[in-house]
Image (cartoon, rainbow, N blue to C red):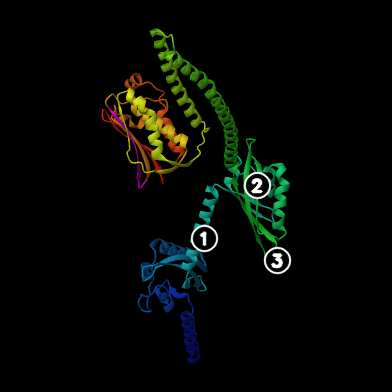
Amino acid sequence: MPADAESDQEMLNRRFRLVAEATRDGLWDWEPQSGRLWCSASLNEQLGYGSDEIVPSMEAWGNLADPEDFAAFRAKVEREMADGGTRFESHVRFWNKDGRLVSMLVRAIIERDAQGRVLRIVGSNTDISALRETEEKLQRSAELIQLAIVDANDGLWDLDMETQRCDLSPRLLQMLGYKEGDWPNTLNSIYRLMHPDDLQTSADNLKPVLDGKSDEFTNYPRFLHKDGTIRHVQCKGKVVRDGAGKVTRIVGWHTDLTDRIEYERQLERLAEENRVARMAAEAANRAKSAFLANMSHELRTPLNAIIGFSEMLEGGFGRTEKTSEYAGLIHKAGGHLLDLISDVLDYSKIEAGALVIEPRLIDLRHEVREAVRLQSLTAMGGGLVLVVDSDTTPVPLNADQRAVRQMLTNLLANAIKFTDAGGTVRAEVTVEERGVVLAVSDTGVGIAPELLPLIGRPFTQLSDHYSKRYQGSGLGLSIVKSLAALHGADVEFDSAPNKGTTVRIVFAGG
């Protein structure tokens, strides 16, 4: 070979090596007949190896490759060689020195002699790991988007303004009772499904978007379901514009509000029914209050007359023993009936909200002494000792005087009724950190622990034994609890069988 020709060949080889070193791709030259393989240093570097760390042989590279990928690569090489091919490409994954799997795009050219025999195969390896990773991410994203479209509770649509193609998600069709294929993918499909009375409103809401005044819109049209019912829908959308501001796409989603709207309507109906019922109840309470006021007068007036005239007969001149006895029975029965009626009317007023308290400053100790004085004859008649606190220091309390007196009367009468002869009933007032405490205690029959929760229930006496032995309406303590509640006070009960009962009214803050 001439010297200058040899010099040219060396220059060509040198340039080829420089190109191989400069490029980011790995270059290789393989002679299948002899098995000789030349690799550029950049090919080794793609996998993290030095230029002399990989033996330049196809077997060595095969050991670094994924077995399935490399087998597919060899099969393609042999097929192209046999079929007279001159170019091919393949994807092969190689293991990097650090353990990562690197994806390579292998491109090659087959050089043949005049008879078509393969002389060499020259190729390049391009690292496409980042590209493949991006493609996989895009594929996963596309799959997730598709799943979201399929599984989302909202119906989605995508309108191409140029072609007027409108892709409807399966959920949107399902929302209206249809399935894919029932309607063409056009904008008119949506308009045909929409309630005719809402078409103009929807067009008006879309106009600012098309005029460039807004990039999103919200609408609340009605749609016709396949079964003939009406579905209430919230439609929200956004637009995509080109560089000139022209709308190229509109994407949106429909949310079915039918169930929520029906629920809200039911609530409105219930609210109206409650309002009507409340007005009826208030009217009934007013009528009840008027009735109670009238009954209070109608019942108490004749009973007071009966009691008064029975007293006259009992102590009048010319009476006989029988007359006095009958007059006494009339007087006793009339008094008992008056007490029962008074309790029922008082509790009914409280229950109906007709009783309004008028608080003012009173001396609670003075009220206790007065109540004890009024009950002293009844206590003496039953053979009881009625004791009041000897401390006369005033205890001021902001309360309704009539209500306080009624609570005291009921508590004392209740204690006297359930205490046998020889027992004691005590009334006292104490000032504690928690407030002013009014307590009435007795040494009477007491109450079993399991019956304590029943104390104060209206029209309730705690046992058949009590109800037979001790007559009454069963409203005394209920009235006490209700009047205490009107004052913001708490009522406490302590009791034990055959040891007596203590009832405390705690007025917070005095």
Q: Are marks 2 and 1 in contact (CB under 8 Å)?
A: no
- Tell me if mark 3 has few (under 14), some (14-19) or many (20+) residues whose alpha carbon lies within 10 angstroms of its own: few
User: What residue range appears in magenta?
Assistant: 423-434
Q: Is residue 409 magenta?
A: no
Left or right of residue 26, residue 447 in this image: left
The residue nearer to you, when weighing 139 against 123, is 139
User: Which is nearer the N-term, disc 3 or disc 1?
Assistant: 1
| Residue 163 seen in the figure | yes
User: Which is nearer the N-term, disc 2 or disc 3?
Assistant: 2
What amino acid type should be assigned to the residue bearing mark 1?
Leu
Q: Which residue is mark 3?
A: 244
- Tell me if mark 2 has few (under 14), some (14-19) or many (20+) residues whose alpha carbon lies within 10 angstroms of its own: some
Left or right of residue 149, residue 160 in this image: right
In this view, the residue farthest toward the bottom is 3
| Residue 40 seen in the figure | no
Q: Position of residue 57 (x, y in %)?
A: 37, 73
Q: Quadrant of residue 92?
A: bottom left
The residue nearer to you, when weighing 25 against 366, is 366
Q: Residue at x 48, y 76 (%)?
A: 24
User: Which is nearer the N-term, disc 2 or disc 1?
Assistant: 1
What amino acid type should be assigned to the residue bearing mark 2?
Tyr
Q: Secondary structure at mark 2?
A: loop
What amino acid type should be assigned to the residue bearing mark 3?
Ala
In this view, the residue farthest toward the front is 317
Left or right of residue 196, residue 236 in this image: left
- Tell me if mark 1 has few (under 14), some (14-19) or many (20+) residues whose alpha carbon lies within 10 angstroms of its own: few
Q: Which residue is mark 2?
A: 220
Q: Which residue is mark 1?
A: 138
Q: Are marks 3 and 1 in contact (CB under 8 Å)?
A: no
Up/down of 84 relative to 204, above or below: below
The residue nearer to you, when weighing 199 against 444, is 444
**Residues under labels 2 and 3: Cα distance?**
30 Å
